Image: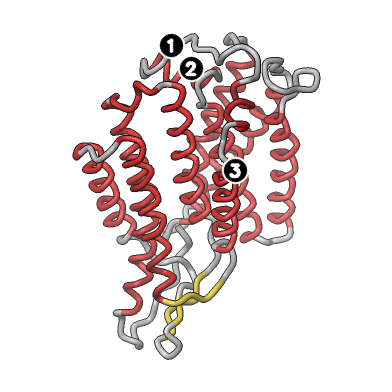
Amino acid sequence: MDMSPIIAIHLSAALGAVAAGPVALWARGSGAQRPKLHRAFGYAWVTLMLVAATSAIFIRDFRLPNINGFTPIHLLIPVVYGMLLLAFWFLARGNSNGHRKTMLGLYTGACGVAGAFTLLPGRYLGNLVFGQWLGLISPNYQPPQGTPMIAQILINTPLWVWGLLAALLALGFSQTRSRTAGLARVALLPLGLGAFSLYGTISAFGTSPTVLGSWLATAVLLVLVVNQLALPAGARYDSATRQFQLPGSWVPMALIMGIFLTKYAVGVSLVMHPELKVHANFSLAIGTLYGVFSGIFAGRSVRLIRLVLRPAADPIQPAFNT
């Protein structure tokens, strides 16, 4: 697919939305609210999402399974419109929590999950990043003739992977609701996901000290950084019942899906291009990315575990979720 004007508009808007979204979310969710910054980047993000969704209507792809050039990824167009309407409906009714969760869910799904699939080799953006920019594949790489590349990937994905995805989605959704949890659960969740990301690193690149060092160093750095942030609003520890009271958040879902999609994308890339296994830049980048996800998750749990060590009379200052 060549870089036509409509694709250039779509790509520019999508990349702009990926960059603007975190700023809007941070400005609203940080300890000190910045409403002007939130509104500015929020409206910019909504505008970019509308431009990306609308321009996608005019982009057809006849190489993938399609109906008159409309592929399954085009289903995101009505999803974007619908969730934006829902988000502003929540806002009009004064439901800021529903507005925030809807926007965060849309960013995670449309910019995160869908964006990851556009980076697959054979897609325009995937060829641009891995080909022209990083030089890891041929800039003009095309999947084998016959069955479309994405269909080949999905068909050859083992069934247990889909089962794992379903379990991780269920786990992520469980974190979006207010809940109580014991110390063991708070501690075991980041340990389990950290082990999963470490397994993804070792299974892909072996026990290279450099790659494992990048994973560990990044994870430790993120633990230290996140540990300095304010606690989520409403987070409490009841010493009598030894239970944490935790507010719902979409951040764990984003981190869980980040680890899963990274492992999935790396697995697909290594099957298609085994030489990436010994490519230093690729392995270090993936090890660092795994470390980011693991460190943020672990840091969030360390903040909670510190509540156990606080004196009972020490009040917990409310703060916004991170």
Residue type, numbered disc 3: Leu
In-image side of 87 versus 129 (left or right): right
Residue type, numbered disc 1: Ser
Residue furthest left in the image? 209
Residue furthest right in the image? 68
> In this picture, is 279 found above or below 172?
above
| Residue visible at 41% across and 13% down in the picture | 132
The image position of residue 289, as x and y in percent, is: 36, 40
Residue type, numbered disc 2: Asn
Calculate the distance from the C-alpha at mark 3 to the C-alpha at mark 1.
Answer: 30 Å
> What number of labels is visible?
3
Calculate the distance from the C-alpha at mark 2 to the C-alpha at mark 1.
Answer: 7 Å
> In this picture, is 277 found above or below 293?
above
Badge number at residue 127: 2
- Residue identifier under label 3: 159
Q: Could you say whether the residue bearing mark 2 is in a helix, strand or loop?
A: helix
